[in-house]
Image (spheres, rainbow, N blue to C red):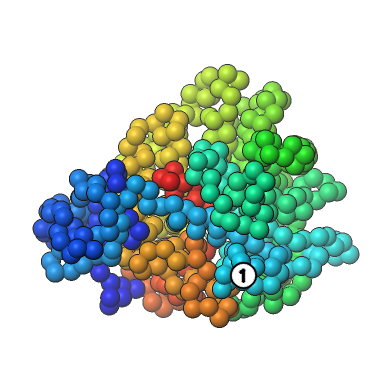
Amino acid sequence: MREAQLRNLAVNQIGYPADGRKSFVCIGQGGPFEVVDSAGGEAVYRGETAQPRFDEAAGITLCTGDFSALTLPGSYFIRLGGENSARFVIAESPYAELQRGLLKAFYFFRCGCDLEEEFAGPWQHKACHLADGTVYDEPGRKLDSVGGWHDAGDYGKYTGPGAKAVADLLLAYELYPQAFREPLPLPESGGGMPDVLHECRYELDWLFKMQDERTGGAFHKLTTKQFPGLDVMPEDDLADLYFLPVSATATGCFAGVMAMAARVYRPFDGEFADRCLAAAERAWRWLADHPDAPGFTNPGDVGTGEYGDNLDLDERYWAAAELFRTTGDEAYHREFLVLAAQQFPKYDLGWANMGAYGTIAYLFGDRAKADPALYGRLLDGLIAEAERFAAISASDSYGISLTPTDYSWGSNMVVLNRAMLLLLAYHLGGSKKYEVIALDHIHYLIGRNALDISYVTGFGDRPVMHPHHRPSVGDKVAQPVPGLVAGGPNRGLNDDCMLEHLQGMPPAQCFIDDEQSYAGNEVTIYWNSPAVFVVSHFV
Ligand code: G3I
Ligand code: 9MR
Ligand code: ZN
């Protein structure tokens, strides 16, 4: 809903890198503007907005004002037609705190341990979900279920989404190790291993428990049968937990992320890396033995997240690529070549389509071992996808790569996945402009959007305050848990709260900061993880 206090001037509410492109977006016809130094109150830069144009996604006429020429570090706001924007900084590195906050969010998602005051501040709470889980198909069989991250605003733990989140964080660490030097800190901080790897290990230690030791397949998810009430704290959610049946999509993701972890953790902990690789290879054998496994669907008495996905080729492709990259074993390469010859999306970053992870693993792997023709085709395809996003971004007033139909449930993941893909294309020799456009996606996330809102709790001048996040609803703390990325505008209006308040709204305005709105204002680990990746590039 467009609220009364909504400003007509949208900026990145944190700020802009000094050497980057800088612009704001103004609702209406625009005109002359000033950038004002918020300490001294003087205008330090004057400009004129560009030609207004109707933006289809936002459903309003907008214009942009460019102030890239202003590079002097400081704190500023925009003044136009008697109105002031939010304050923002221009700084060498404005996103260090944001990046740490986005990563720290994973600590807040932890399940099965006390969140101690020293690390969690007012959002501390007791250990949760400590009971064994029952294997759904074998009611007499109980297994240790403790650990990992809650998926989202609910307390389910789902193998595929967990693997996507870890993969994004490990990729961020592989590409931007310098962004992870400072401790967060975490209870495990120290010992020579960066905190991002400590945090991912918390999830990986749980993921091992999702591999059925009898078959090597990965259980699709571990949840209660129904979602608990919205104000239930995790430690009060005592309903029985179930390991839901093994699926090929979960097993493919499990193999992919474990093979990746084997590579990334090798320099720090060889024994752990060996365990990861053995688990990945065992999962691979399950996949080989189950070429036609059906997609997962919830049994009739289970109402928690389904993460249904009938296409498992992309997960198999990812697994083969990571196993090949990590081991150099030609047998995995042959499997990868067979999978790569099939038709399915190869440039999507999940949660359902995981193909890009396979493509990236191949492109970042040992080029001397790759098939030159396939390598070239995959690289061309990645660059073509980046070009497609660049073209959409060029015609969007906020500079992002979403078309009006792309604003569906979790649209902020689409924003961040596409920024991530642009950065990966840039790293693989693509145009420098991809980096500039990726930064525009961060600006959108942190306030330069149709609702003048920062979609990250605790960051920016007007952040999301009421996420659909059970701990934030159930604790007695006014501020939500910080560092969480909300799902964002969803033209599907898939919950009653959206249906009540947002009928007829243009796609990019289909968002309400209300805790009841699970289809727009929930938070998840795999919306935070691409945010960590993208922001780490600019740290
Ligand atoms: O991809 C299609 C697009 O092609 C189409 O144009 C559009 C039109 O509606 O729909 C798009 O699909 C949507 C899909 O998300 C996109 O990822 C579906 O409509 C939408 O229903 C689906 O929503 C998923 C939602 O669960 C419901 O299944 C979200 O992605 C997914 O993030 C969300 O996950 C939940 C878990 O189940 C439980 N835990 C919380 C989590 C987040 O809310
Ligand atoms: O609260 C649930 C949220 O965490 C899930 O992501 C969402 C996905 O289906 O479902 C929410 O639960 C709602 C349920 O689906 C329908 N009845 C209202 C529930 C929210 O209060
Ligand atoms: Zn828990």
Does any atom of ligand 3 lie closer than 8 Å to the CB of label 1?
no
**Mark 1 = which residue?**
117
Q: Position of residue 2 (x, y in %)?
A: 30, 73
- Quarter of the image for the N terminus: give it: bottom left
Residue at image position (34%, 44%) is 437
Q: Position of residue 124 (x, y in %)?
A: 61, 71
For mark 1, give the secondary structure: helix
Q: Position of residue 200 (x, y in %)?
A: 64, 50
- Residue 477 visible in this rendered orientation of the protein: yes
Asked if residue 36 is positioned above or below residue 472 in the image, the reply reads: above
Label 1 is placed on what type of residue? Answer: Glu
Q: Is 472 situated left or right of 247 in this image? A: left
The image quarter containing residue 464 is bottom left
Q: Is 234 situated left or right of 411 in this image? A: right
Q: Nearer the viewer, residue 158 or 404?
A: 158
Residue at image position (69%, 36%) is 266
Residue at image position (59%, 24%) is 366
Q: Nearer the viewer, residue 531 or 153?
A: 531
Q: Residues within 10 Å of mark 1 (few under 14, many from 20)?
A: few
Asked if residue 487 is positioned above or below residue 350 in the image, the reply reads: below
Q: Position of residue 275 (x, y in %)?
A: 77, 41
